[in-house]
Image (cartoon, rainbow, N blue to C red):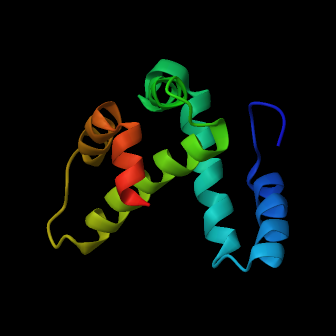
Amino acid sequence: MSGSRLTSKSALTWHVTITVRHRLPNAKVHATVHAMVETQIALGDETPACRTVQRLMDPGLDRHETVHAIGWVLIQFMSDLMDRSETVTEPNAAYFAALERFTVEDWARAQ
């Protein structure tokens, strides 16, 4: 998709098309995560997502793959939060720290 901002609807449309062609599971969740990551990127320095995009693209990942990588980190943290019995007072701190540490090599291992 061209442009720096994706809406949930445009991401959903694109991913439904890809899902039909390649039989990917759960296109709606996939598109929603894309929109969440793109929103974080658009916030600039308010989150580490924008810096992470640049850091992952510098060695050669394309933007779409980079959004997937950040989305993978996000989903890992969301899953961990849902599995906890105790309340986390500042859940973003651990997620932001993970983004700051995340590398292309980490993404390759996650594949």
Image-quadrant location for residue 81 = bottom left
Name the foreground residue: 48 vs 93: 48
What is the total number of numbered labels drawn onto the structure image?
Answer: 0
- Vertically, is 101 above or below 67? above
Q: Quadrant of the N terminus?
A: top right
Looking at the picture, how far across and down is residue 78, in whole percent?
37, 61
- Vertically, is 63 above or below 43? below
- Vertically, is 103 above or below 74? above
Name the foreground residue: 35 vs 108: 108
Residue at (66, 44) in percent of width and height: 64
Residue at (83, 53) in percent of width and height: 10
Looking at the picture, how far across and down is residue 12, in whole percent?
77, 62
Image-quadrant location for residue 97 = top left
Q: Quadrant of the C terminus?
A: bottom left
Looking at the picture, how far across and down is residue 95, in whole percent?
31, 44
Looking at the picture, how far across and down is residue 36, in whole percent?
58, 48
Q: Residue furthest top?
A: 45
Image-quadrant location for residue 86 = bottom left
Q: Residue furthest left?
A: 86
Name the foreground residue: 72 vs 23: 23
Would residue 91 be found to the left or right of residue 85 on screen? right
